[in-house]
Amino acid sequence: MIFIIFVVLGSLIGLGLGVASRRFAVEGDPLVDEIEALLPGGQCGQCGKAGCRQAAEAMVNGEMGVDGCPPASGAFRSAAAKVLGISMSSDDQDIIWLAKVDESHCTGCTRCFKACPYDAIVGATKQVHTVVSDVCTGCKLCADTCPQGCIEMYSPQMVANRWFWPKPIEARG
């Protein structure tokens, strides 16, 4: 008998919570959702905001420009400017930055490994680390935290036999 009372009570409470969640739902801004989907999603905080959602809200509100996210590429900036309906200056270029570890000076302290929000650095404690260039966004967090100064940021040369596809942009449909 007590079991039936708890089942009925649980069902009524669940039904009440379901009705309340639909009745009192707060709709989000679809523009913020679209800008957030374009951001890298590392939640690194380099822009001064707590995460990518807050950065997207600041961009939509005009508190931060589309160039406020350091890890984001020029493709993001142009796509975000298009979504927001603003124009970008012609001197904005899509410069690709990548990190490179000088393996002769790396002691394997793992600080760069822990600082990378995109898991672009591989290695183990007291072993040489390396950067996976296909995943690296060029955010420079690893270079800032390396105590040996063995991580440098460089822009790879675009030549015919070593050409990089730009990072993909999520298709909208």
Image (cartoon, rainbow, N blue to C red):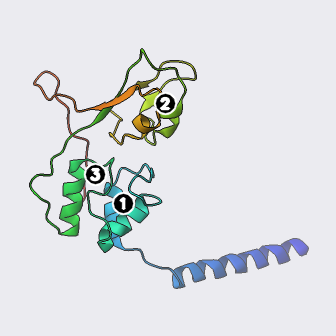
Real-space CA distance between mark 1 and mark 3, rounded to the nearest whole angstrom: 11 Å
**Residue drawn at the location 49% of the way across and 32% of the way down:** 113
Amino acid type at image mark 3? Glu
Q: Are marks 3 and 2 in contact (CB under 8 Å)?
A: no
Residue 7 at least partly seen: yes
Q: Could you say where residue 59 lies in the image, as x and y percent from the top left?
A: 31, 66
In this view, the mark in front (1 or 2): 2
Q: Is residue 102 above or below residue 17?
A: above
Residue that mark 3 sits on? 170
Pointer 1 or 3: first along the chain: 1
Numbered mark located on residue 50 in the image: none
The residue at which mark 2 appears reads as 147
Instruction: Point out the tag, 3 or 2, that comes first from the N-terminus.
Output: 2
In the displayed structure, would residue 46 be above or below residue 155?
below
Given the current orientation, which residue lies at the most extreme bottom position?
A: 23
Q: Position of residue 50 (x, y in %)?
A: 47, 60
Q: Is residue 132 visible?
A: no
Front-most of residues 6 and 69: 69
Residue 61, percent across and down?
32, 74
Q: Residue at 42% of width from left, 62% of height from top?
A: 53
Which numbered disc covers residue 36? Answer: 1
Which residue is at 72% across, 76% downward?
11
Dot 1 and dot 3 residues touching (CB under 8 Å): no
Q: Relative to 115, is 86 above or below?
A: below
